[in-house]
Amino acid sequence: MNNTLLRSKLELRVNKLASLDYGNIEPWQQAEAVNKAQSEWVRRQLEGINQEKAGNEASTRRIDDLQQLLVTWTGDFTPQNNNQYWQSTTWPSNYMEWCRIDAQAQDDCKICPPRPLTIFEGNEADVNVYLADTNRRPSYTWATTFSTVMNNTFKIWTDGEFNIVNPLVTFYRVPNTIVFLGTYDPYTNTTSTVDVPCEFPDNITEIIIDEAAAILALDIDDNQKNAQLSQRAEHNT
């Protein structure tokens, strides 16, 4: 859906059939509301706070709706704390939510090929528990370990048993920011020179428009319209 149609639909929902009752809403406010609605919709799908209470890949529809946000990232991992874990030195700027980490294990044998690891997601608070548990601690023999996230870094735990080779992080990225061409941004004091439409299919964009209209309705103290549009968006999610 192009941005001209998107803005027309947004104004239609907020302005009571475009009667210009609320014609004082600036284009930058429209863009801000649309991007906020887009972010909230994505987070709700990932966390499962939706009509079906289903998160990211808990249903076929969630998989279809969110698959375009899944990306892979190869970061630079280095051993830390006497090789107890390998930690990424950078962090993807468009990171939104963890999906999985793949890697291989390499021991001191110079001629043995690296072994693919099975890595489960762990909690930083439970690291000591994992390390004390023979079924969950890092094991080169069983090619299993766990990973955690802390201070905008990824950690793959080895407990000194092996080295990490070819790490690959799969995560959900932040959706592209929607930009209206020629819109003045009071935050940056610049006028946009590009037009960036919503990257989601039209059926999802329609839901995002409803949510954006609800946000604007709340901003202008139209609580009834906000409630109606919020319920509509949630029902169709």
Image: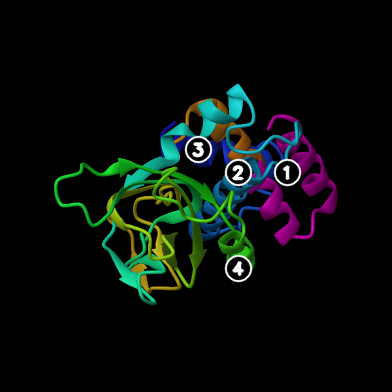
Q: Nearer the viewer, residue 3 or 132?
A: 132
- Residue 98: numbered disc: none
Residue 1 image offset from top left, x and y in percent = 44, 31
Q: CA distance from mark 3 to mark 2?
A: 24 Å
Mark 1 surroundings within 10 Å by alpha-carbon count, few (fewer than 14), some (14 through 19), many (20 or more): some
In the picture, which quadrant includes the C terminus? top right
Mark nearer the viewer, 3 or 2: 2
Residue 226 image offset from top left, x and y in percent = 78, 48
Q: CA distance from mark 1 to mark 4?
A: 31 Å
Mark nearer the viewer, 3 or 1: 1
Q: Which structural element holds mark 3?
A: helix
Q: Which structural element holds mark 4?
A: helix
Q: Amino acid at mark 2?
A: Leu
Mark nearer the viewer, 4 or 2: 4
Mark 2 surroundings within 10 Å by alpha-carbon count, few (fewer than 14), some (14 through 19), many (20 or more): many
Q: Earlier in the sequence, mark 3 or mark 2?
A: 3
Q: Amino acid at mark 1?
A: Ile
Q: Give the labeled residue for mark 1.
A: 49
